[in-house]
Amino acid sequence: MQNREATLSGLHAGFFRSAADRPHRPALEVGTDALSYEQLRQRACALAGTLSRNTLCTHPKVGILASRSVDMYAGILGALACGGTVVPLNPGFPAERCAQMIELAELDAIVADSTGCKMLHAVMSLLTRSVLLVVPESRVDEIRAQLPKAKVMGPEPARQDWQPSDVEPEDLAYLFFTSGSTGVPKGVTVLHRNAARFVEMSMERYGQLNIGRNDRFSQFYDITFDSSMFDIFVSWACGACLCCPTTVEWVNSNKFIVERKLTVIDIVPSMGHTMNRSNGWRAGRFETLRLCRFGGEALPAELAAALASAAPHAAIDNVYGPTECTVDAAYYRWDPARSVRDAVHGVVPIGIAGPRVGLRVVDEQMNDVPVGRDGELLISGPQVTPGYWKDSDRTAQSFISLPGSGVVHYRTGDLVRQMPPGQPIPYLGRMDFQIKIAGVRIELGEVEQALRQASGTDLAVAVGWPPSPSGAAGIVGFVVKEGGDGAAIRRRLKEVLPAVMVPKDIHVIDNMPLNVNGKIDRKALLVRLKDADDPVAEGFGR
């Protein structure tokens, strides 16, 4: 069986090759749980066989409703190993949002760990479709009693003759849901060929640093964030050990890095700022680190310099790439001798295109801009995904073929500067109302849609505030008086939006300011927020 597993293709192939080559090496640590490659393979195969036999689908779509547990990782591998698609779900999201994603994805099954089990009753009560539930064996009776009409089962022992499924390059590996401007989450479809190329590119880049079987990778990201694919699949393709902090350990990530002797970490700059408070990144603290990656949002130069000092033996990479282009599209390696000069407005460049990735900077007419001019960044190459799940209109708007090229380019909406060949591309900001908070991409239009519904008025606006290198550190909402009480609106928003998308303040104002075109003047609202002496609202709720 292991010879067969060693020849697999697709995103899960790296794990099974490592399991065949080094079955007794450590593959995963979560809290006090530690599994070898063979132990994790057995757990994954048991889940894969269970899914195959009970969904009766060649390519089932499997939601992973779990958080920081062995069951979560076994579920991800099991879904892929049965030829299925992984659809990450966060137990911390409101039940309504999880149910919305389940319906949109047309899930065939949900794999839930103990944390996910706590919200199954609330989620299932909102569904119109039948979904197989695979839960820990210890929770089967409890969940069956809660949901007598649902098909609930635990993982069945793997049969001796069962083998992981091979996949085609065009098969769907992941479906990531991100914030949508219409108020409905949009699903980004990641094919096996997209994801496999990303892992291959990562191996090419970090093989130069001899990252391999003796390394210990962090997993600070939630699995609903596409950057988690680096931690999970690159570590296993290397034959390394993936180390996931528990919720308690995550709170003190610096201590976790030291105690677990991590050698590779991947974090968003916002998390880095938190970790660096109170001299958390003092010089020389992280002696074991060999590679540190920042991604998900703009990276301030001073933060990169601080980590370089704290991890003196590590390469520091700023990585850039939207979900639509499978995690990484460009890289920038921090160099104390030149990087401060390369930074524009104190922000580290997005860098140079990865191998086989194409980057173009264009104007509004989609023409290449000359060197030194600013424009929108477009991305092409084998990691560009097919588009959005069941949304051809949105796909056509964002994935375009330039005249005469015949190549599909993804419109990032990011403002950058055209540079001479070989020089790193600087990041200048967003071209639309999309922002990132703690690495989470948010469309303010979705927040506004929820604001309108919660307040019962069409005059509702969300703005990013206060400013940060990635756009904004938070969200502030504005509604007119007839929208009601700000505190009550926030309470309603908490029921339908993830916490990161709920405005910190709701300002109730007499009238919305309008520009010369009769449109709501967002800049005027931002000016009001900036002017601390100007009373912004008559009574707002926190």
Image (cartoon, rainbow, N blue to C red):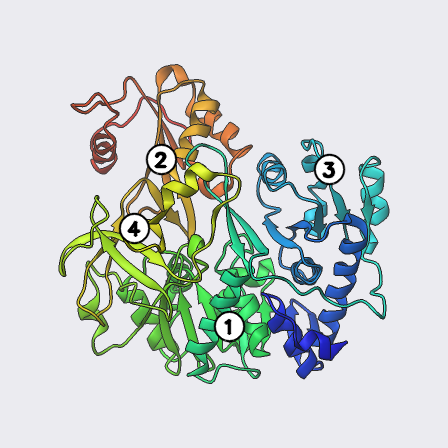
Mark 2 neighbour density, 10 Å: few (under 14) some (14–19) many (20 or more): many
The kind of residue on which mark 2 rests is Val
Labelled pair 2, 3 in contact (Cβ < 8 Å): no
Q: Which residue is mark 1?
A: 257
Q: Is residue 36 visible?
A: no
The kind of residue on which mark 1 rests is Ile
181 or 377, which lies in front? 377
Say which residue appears at 24% left-offset and 24% top-offset: 519
Judged left or right of residue 13, residue 517 is left
Chain-order first, disc 1 or disc 3:
3
Say which residue appears at 47% left-offset and 85% top-offset: 210
Quadrant that contains the C terminus: top left
Q: Position of residue 37 (x, y in %)?
A: 69, 75
The kind of residue on which mark 4 rests is Leu
Judged left or right of residue 237, residue 33 is right
Chain-order first, disc 3 or disc 4:
3
Mark 1 neighbour density, 10 Å: few (under 14) some (14–19) many (20 or more): many
- Of labels 3 and 4, the one closer to you: 4
3D distance between C-alphas at marks 1 and 3: 36 Å
Chain-order first, disc 2 or disc 3:
3
3D distance between C-alphas at marks 1 and 4: 45 Å
- 235, above or below 514, in the image: below
The disc at residue 121 is 3
Quadrant that contains the N terminus: bottom right
Q: Is residue 382 visible?
A: yes
Q: Which residue is mark 2?
A: 476
Say which residue appears at 37% left-offset and 78% top-offset: 315
